[in-house]
Image (spheres, rainbow, N blue to C red):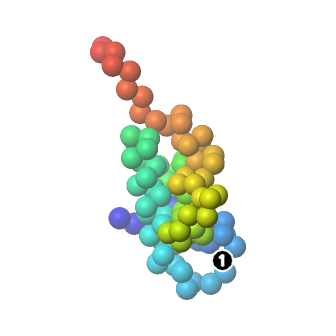
Protein backbone atom coordinates (compact mmCIF):
# COMPACT_ATOMS: atom_id res chain seq x y z
CA UNK A 1 0.00 0.00 0.00
CA UNK A 2 1.28 3.43 -0.92
CA UNK A 3 0.52 6.12 1.64
CA UNK A 4 -1.86 8.88 0.56
CA UNK A 5 -0.12 11.41 2.79
CA UNK A 6 2.96 12.85 1.07
CA UNK A 7 6.30 11.86 2.61
CA UNK A 8 7.46 15.46 1.99
CA UNK A 9 4.78 16.65 4.42
CA UNK A 10 6.00 14.24 7.10
CA UNK A 11 9.59 15.36 6.49
CA UNK A 12 8.45 18.96 7.07
CA UNK A 13 6.68 17.91 10.27
CA UNK A 14 9.88 16.28 11.50
CA UNK A 15 12.24 19.01 10.19
CA UNK A 16 14.10 16.48 8.06
CA UNK A 17 15.90 17.90 5.04
CA UNK A 18 17.52 14.74 3.63
CA UNK A 19 16.26 11.63 1.86
CA UNK A 20 18.05 9.00 3.94
CA UNK A 21 14.91 7.91 5.81
CA UNK A 22 12.43 8.16 2.92
CA UNK A 23 11.48 4.48 2.85
CA UNK A 24 11.04 4.32 6.62
CA UNK A 25 8.95 7.50 6.65
CA UNK A 26 6.72 6.13 3.87
CA UNK A 27 6.31 2.91 5.85
CA UNK A 28 5.34 4.81 9.02
CA UNK A 29 2.79 6.87 7.06
CA UNK A 30 1.27 3.74 5.54
CA UNK A 31 1.01 2.10 8.96
CA UNK A 32 -0.54 5.27 10.43
CA UNK A 33 -3.16 5.43 7.68
CA UNK A 34 -4.06 1.77 8.23
CA UNK A 35 -4.29 2.37 11.99
CA UNK A 36 -6.60 5.35 11.37
CA UNK A 37 -8.86 3.33 9.04
CA UNK A 38 -9.04 0.51 11.59
CA UNK A 39 -9.73 2.93 14.45
CA UNK A 40 -12.46 4.87 12.66
CA UNK A 41 -14.00 1.99 10.73
CA UNK A 42 -13.96 4.05 7.53
CA UNK A 43 -11.33 4.27 4.76
CA UNK A 44 -8.54 6.79 5.24
CA UNK A 45 -9.18 9.97 3.25
CA UNK A 46 -5.97 11.70 2.16
CA UNK A 47 -7.97 14.80 1.18
CA UNK A 48 -9.25 15.28 4.75
CA UNK A 49 -6.99 17.65 6.70
CA UNK A 50 -7.93 16.21 10.12
CA UNK A 51 -7.13 12.64 9.06
CA UNK A 52 -3.87 13.74 7.42
CA UNK A 53 -2.91 15.64 10.59
CA UNK A 54 -3.62 12.53 12.67
CA UNK A 55 -1.48 10.45 10.27
CA UNK A 56 1.36 12.98 10.51
CA UNK A 57 1.23 13.03 14.31
CA UNK A 58 1.09 9.25 14.54
CA UNK A 59 3.83 8.60 11.97
CA UNK A 60 6.06 11.27 13.55
CA UNK A 61 5.61 9.73 16.97
CA UNK A 62 6.37 6.22 15.72
CA UNK A 63 9.43 7.50 13.83
CA UNK A 64 10.82 9.29 16.88
CA UNK A 65 9.92 6.55 19.40
CA UNK A 66 11.48 3.49 17.75
CA UNK A 67 12.92 2.01 20.94
CA UNK A 68 11.20 -1.05 22.36
CA UNK A 69 12.19 -0.14 25.92
CA UNK A 70 9.77 1.59 28.26
CA UNK A 71 11.11 4.67 30.02
CA UNK A 72 8.01 5.42 32.08
CA UNK A 73 6.75 8.21 29.83
CA UNK A 74 5.94 6.32 26.63
CA UNK A 75 2.43 6.11 25.30
CA UNK A 76 1.11 4.01 22.43
CA UNK A 77 -0.75 6.82 20.67
CA UNK A 78 0.12 10.53 20.93
CA UNK A 79 -2.31 12.85 22.68
CA UNK A 80 -4.72 14.46 20.24
CA UNK A 81 -4.78 11.73 17.60
CA UNK A 82 -7.95 10.10 18.92
CA UNK A 83 -9.54 13.54 19.39
CA UNK A 84 -8.89 14.38 15.74
CA UNK A 85 -10.48 11.11 14.62
CA UNK A 86 -13.45 10.77 16.96
CA UNK A 87 -15.94 12.42 14.60
CA UNK A 88 -14.99 10.00 11.80
CA UNK A 89 -15.65 6.84 13.79
CA UNK A 90 -18.27 4.57 12.32
CA UNK A 91 -20.78 4.53 15.17
CA UNK A 92 -22.62 1.27 15.74
CA UNK A 93 -25.72 1.88 17.83
CA UNK A 94 -27.53 -1.42 17.50
CA UNK A 95 -30.68 0.31 16.26
CA UNK A 96 -32.06 -1.05 13.01
CA UNK A 97 -33.89 0.94 10.37
Quarter of the image holding residue 92? top left
Q: Is residue 94 above or below residue 1?
A: above
Q: Which residue is pictured at 34% across the width and 15% down the height? A: 95
Q: Is residue 18 above or below residue 81?
A: below
Q: Which residue is pictured at 30% across the width and 14% down the height? A: 97
Q: Can residue 50 be seen from the camera position used here? A: no
Residue at which label 1 appears:
16
Location of residue 56 in the rendering, given as x and y in whole percent from the top left corner: 58, 59
- Left or right? Give the position of 76 relative to 12: left
Q: Is residue 75 above or below residue 50?
A: below
Q: Which residue is pictured at 40% across the width and 66% down the height? A: 2
Location of residue 47 in the rendering, given as x and y in whole percent from the top left corner: 52, 51
Q: Nearer the viewer, residue 92 or 97?
A: 92
Q: Can residue 21 be seen from the camera position used here? A: yes
- Left or right? Give the position of 67 relative to 94: right
Q: Which residue sits furthest right?
A: 15
Q: Nearer the viewer, residue 46 or 68?
A: 68
Location of residue 31 in the rendering, given as x and y in whole percent from the top left corner: 43, 61
Location of residue 53 in the rendering, given as x and y in whole percent from the top left corner: 60, 53
Q: Nearer the viewer, residue 61 or 13?
A: 61
Q: Secondary structure at mark 1?
A: loop
| Quadrant of the rendering where the N terminus is positioned | bottom left
Tally the numbered discs: 1
- Left or right? Give the position of 90 relative to 52: left
Amino acid sequence: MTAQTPVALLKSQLNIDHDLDGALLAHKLGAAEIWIANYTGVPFDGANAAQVEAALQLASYWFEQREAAFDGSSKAIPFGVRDLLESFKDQVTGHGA
